[in-house]
Amino acid sequence: MSIALVVVDLQRDYFPGGNMELVGVEKAAENARLLLSAFRDKGLTVVHVQHLSARPNATFFLPGTKGAEIHEMVAPIPGESVVTKNYPNSFRDTNLLAVLKATGTDSLVLCGAMSHMCIDATTRAAFDLGFRCIVAEDACATRDLVFQDRTVKAADVHASFMAALSMPYAQVLTAKETMAQIV
């Protein structure tokens, strides 16, 4: 088994002061940083995914802005791949699959943002492409959503999407449980 860590969209716009602040993003980034350290210590593959908005009238992740930069808590180091994307699915119109195939990867640990959007889309796509997936749920963050004049709290959005991914798409674990599995 060859495993890779895929850190999705932990960019400055999602952090305090950014244009799309997420609930609990700093704690999620701390847990992502723990995963990064574990993967780096073991010499395992790490891929960072960076979203750059291509939509007209987009308000965050605008190319060339500070908000689109990967947050310093989880910034890539030399030798780590950075895949840029324009859609929620990190595989769509990117070289992510080629990067993973080049390293012989067959299993992924996914973390980042947003739980209900890019983590969900990327995990489902990875599963469909034949990867064994683990989602480190406490290294993911999201935001409150509104549906039919009802606010759905971020914790409930997150829990719903993690529950939906947990069968059959991924094992949904904490960062510490994930690290215990890759030892």
Image (cartoon, rainbow, N blue to C red):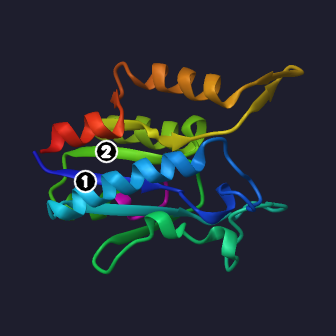
Quadrant of residue 77 within the rendered picture: bottom left
Q: Is 33 left, or right, of 68 in this rendering?
A: left
Q: Are marks 2 and 1 in contact (CB under 8 Å)?
A: yes
Residue 13 image offset from top left, x and y in percent: 68, 61
Identify which residue is drawn at 16% across, 43% down. 182
* Crowd band around label 2 with a 10 angstrom C-alpha radius: few (<14), some (14–19), many (20+): many
Q: Does the image show residue 143?
A: yes
Residue 116 lies, in percent from the top left, at 59, 35
Q: Position of residue 163 (x, y in %)?
A: 47, 19
Rendering coords of residue 25 (x, y %):
59, 48
Which of the labelled discs sits on residue 161, or is there none? none
Q: Residue at x 32, y 58 (%)?
A: 36
| Relative height, residue 125 to residue 81 (above, below) | above
Magenta stretch: dominant secondary structure: loop
What is the tally of numbered marks visible in this picture? 2
Tag 2 residue: 109
Magenta highlight range: 92-96
Please give left or right for residue 156 compared with residue 2 in the image: right
Could you tell me which residue is drawn at 59 percent across and 72 percent down?
A: 69
Q: Is 128 located above or below residue 42 in the figure?
A: above
Q: Secondary structure at mark 2?
A: strand
Residue denoted by label 1: 4
Q: Residue at x 48, y 26 (%)?
A: 162
Residue 112 highlighted magenta (yes or no): no
Tell me the amino acid under the disc marked 1: Ala
In the depicted view, which residue is nearer to us: 93 or 132? 132
